[in-house]
């Protein structure tokens, strides 16, 4: 399961350079070409990181960044500002608007990939040992093992991937369609109701040794993992 990167850029050659180099590293890419489309993409796709160009139609990258930071649902989204403006005052404005990093054109694709990788390391919920912890559930990214309160949880590959997505952003509601994209991949056709079957198996496995149901069903919307009982 790769990170989902949103590229917000209205220059097609720039998009293709970014897409090629990031997809080669295994990232999944979504593209928006103006400020309004960018905000819609953030809400629809829940990216793990956004690369936003300063100069955009409709809304500037700075405006988009500020809007993302003002929304409690999206305010933690890691953002790299991409721009041809290299003056110190411009860099300060970009960072003050909420960007986590700032890259000036022309840039090295290798440098951009390195910055993306570094920012994801800082902001994703894995600790230095490659583990994700939520409540009493521990997911080891390296060994693909899951324990709850010290007890081993037996999961199939699909249930493991679903759990990893949900634990990555506790409290966030993922629609069936979004889980299909993140777990199975956007190029594979799977019935949306298949998600329900695997969620059921995941719930059963997580409760095999007792404990509350950490998977919450949001009627008409999808699923989340949080402290509320499902």
Image (spheres, rainbow, N blue to C red):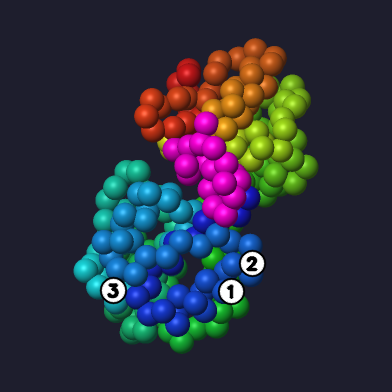
Q: Which residue is mark 1?
A: 21
Q: Are marks 2 and 1 in contact (CB under 8 Å)?
A: yes
The region drawn magenta spans 175-193
Label annotation for residue 56:
3
Mark 3, other Cα within 10 Å: few <14 / some 14–19 / many ≥20: many
Residue 65 picture quarter: bottom left
Label annotation for residue 25:
2
User: From the viewer's perspective, is residue 18 above or below residue 96?
Assistant: below
Q: Residue at x 47, y 25 (%)?
A: 216
Looking at the rendered structure, the secondary structure element under dot 3 is loop
User: From the viewer's perspective, is residue 106 above or below residue 40?
Assistant: below
Query: At which x and y percent is residue 218?
Result: 40, 27
Looking at the rendered structure, the secondary structure element under dot 2 is loop
Residue 141 picture quarter: top right
Query: At which x and y percent is residue 120?
Result: 55, 57
Looking at the rendered structure, the secondary structure element under dot 1 is helix
**Measured Cα–Cα span from mark 2 to mark 1:** 7 Å
């Amino acid at each position: 399961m790769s990170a989902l990167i949103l590229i917000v850029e209205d220059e097609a050659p720039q998009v293709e350079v970014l897409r090629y180099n990031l997809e080669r590293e295994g990232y999944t890419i979504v593209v928006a070409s103006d400020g309004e489309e960018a905000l819609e993409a953030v809400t629809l796709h829940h990216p793990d990181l956004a690369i936003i160009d300063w100069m955009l139609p409709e809304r500037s990258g700075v405006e988009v960044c500020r809007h993302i930071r003002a929304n409690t649902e999206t305010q933690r989204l890691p953002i790299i500002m991409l721009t041809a403006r290299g003056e110190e005052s411009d860099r300060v404005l970009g960072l003050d608007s909420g960007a986590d990093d700032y890259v000036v054109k022309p840039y090295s694709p290798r440098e951009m990939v390195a910055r993306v990788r570094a920012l994801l390391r800082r902001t994703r919920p894995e600790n230095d040992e490659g583990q994700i912890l939520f409540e009493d559930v521990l997911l080891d990214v390296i060994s693909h093992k899951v324990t709850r309160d010290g007890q081993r949880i037996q999961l199939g590959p699909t249930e493991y991937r679903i759990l990893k997505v949900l634990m990555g952003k506790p409290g966030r509601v993922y629609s069936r369609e979004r889980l299909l994209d993140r777990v199975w991949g956007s190029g594979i056709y799977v019935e949306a109701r298949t998600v329900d079957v695997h969620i059921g198996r995941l719930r059963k496995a997580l409760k095999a040794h007792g404990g509350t149901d950490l998977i919450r069903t949001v009627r008409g919307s999808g699923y989340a993992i949080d402290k509320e009982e499902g």
